Amino acid sequence: MIRLAVLGMMHETNTYSSNLADLETYNAGAIHRGDELIERFAESQATIGGFLRQSEDQRHVDTVPLIFAGTTPCGMVTAEAYDTIVGEMRQKLNAAGPFDGVLLALHGACVAENHKSADADIAAAVRATVGPGVPIGVVLDMHANFDPRLLDYVDVVLAYQTNPHVDPHHKAAECRALIVEMIRTGVRPTTVGRTLPLACTITRQGTADSPVSDLLDLASQLETEPGAIDVSLLLGFQYADVPHMGMSVLATHSDRAEAERLSRVLADAVWQARTDLQGGAITVDTAASAVEQHGQQKPILLLDIGDNIGAGGPGDSMVPLSALLDRGIERTVTTCRDRDAISSLRSLPVGASVQIDLGGASPECPGPPLHLNGTIAGRHNGPYRTDGPAHGGFRYFDGGEMVALTTPGGTAVVVTSKPVQPVTPAQLRVVGLDPLDFRAIYAKGVNGPLAGYADICGKHLAVDTPGITRASMTALEYRHRRRPMFPFEPDACYP
């Protein structure tokens, strides 16, 4: 019987955010242990779900779920939270071991106060615990900032290749099969990673759009060559100011020289596309005009780039909605994280009239609060579930206490006590709102909301709003990134 350990810690860290991922944040429902992993993820399309999947040819594999910690993107993981969680990961590996293999879920863009390349350091801790002979497989988010040190500690690294991320389960199942094969045969392939002095703007990261779609087609082509196991593109995460920020490629092959060659072919193609990997977005005024002219029955999906919760935005900017209301445009719905507002609304029943200031409270919020006169339309407290497609493959989401407020003109704000990515219309429905009642849905995300809202919205527009997840990378102050690097230094060279 082959024994596999399943564990992980995933965090996408925005180093420009002051909202730290502390131990209290993790203890409030962001850590799952033992059979909780099965209850939470077994039916999901998330990474852990793929790790837990028992295929027909793996009936003699004993999968042991240990611990998984994952919270909404925000600022750095505190040293206390990091040390506590990684310490528990090591303790559980020791207590439940020995294991024949390890399946490790990482993001690839995690930064802790005491570990600037937290993912590589987590892998190092796992390797030190299980010893040198145990195969370790890792699945990364497509937005990983790849640190070559990771390959010193693990045997295979795969990455999501869709954005929005709808293939985590598939990649994790593939990783599991590779680790089982390594255990059975004793043969370990080689993974080669190449980092480029190149960052890609968030508006050019959709995998259905050129040039990323063209690069993925090339990667798929390279994977068909004899002996090739995986060829992957990593988009990087530009809101983490670390030395390894930027785009990378990975190639796994039975032969090192061939892995080197395949990674070089894809890296060269990425570099040739560097100019096309840059791009902007429409202004808030242009977005408002688009809503005014929008005559389709389905709502238009507006994407609030600057306050993208999925990239660590605080989720309390009312700048876009205020701009629409100033022009008399109603029937828009958006979300706002505001704990104080939730506290003040807690004692009021559904149907109560309220006058309240929303948002604008976080240090990174780019605008003032919005004064709203409205009615409490619905409430929900705790996790909610979607059975439809969702970014990351997750089934459960948690906005804490959520209250829907509606105005006489049909505008609505879903106020949450926790930051939660707006990647599924289930968030609107659980508070009594019908997504089809609105002319526009203003989602605090960029690519993340696209999968969940594909059947709800007629079209989508990315809007260049202010905030710490703004579209313009050159407007961010970097202290630790590599130099020279494109597009910051246009004369940067590769290799």
Image: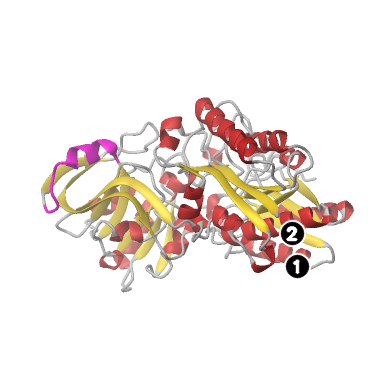
Q: Find out whether residue 347 is within the magenta segment.
A: yes
Q: Is residue 140 above or below residue 298?
A: above
At x 54%, y 31%, the residue is 82
Q: Secondary structure at mark 2?
A: strand
Report the mark closest to the observer, 1 or 2: 2
Q: Is residue 456 magenta?
A: no
* Pointer 2 local density, CA inside 10 Å: few below 14, some 14–19, many at least 20: many
Report the residue marked by disc 1. Answer: 221
Query: As rendered, which of 133 and 334 lies closer to the eye?
Result: 133
Q: Which residues are magenta?
A: 338-351
Work out which quarter of the rendered image holds the N terminus and state it: bottom right
Residue type of the residue flagged with mark 2: Asp
Q: Which image quadrant: the C terminus? A: top right
CA neighbours of label 1 inside 10 A, class few (<14), some (14 to 19), many (20+): few
Residue sitting at x 68%, y 56%: 175
x and y percentages locating residue 242 in the rendered image: 62, 34
Q: Which percent across, then down, holds residue 74?
A: 46, 38
Residue located beneath label 2 in the image? 230
For marks 1 and 2, give the CA distance.
10 Å
Write the residue at 75% across / 42% down.
151
The residue shown at (25%, 56%) is: 431
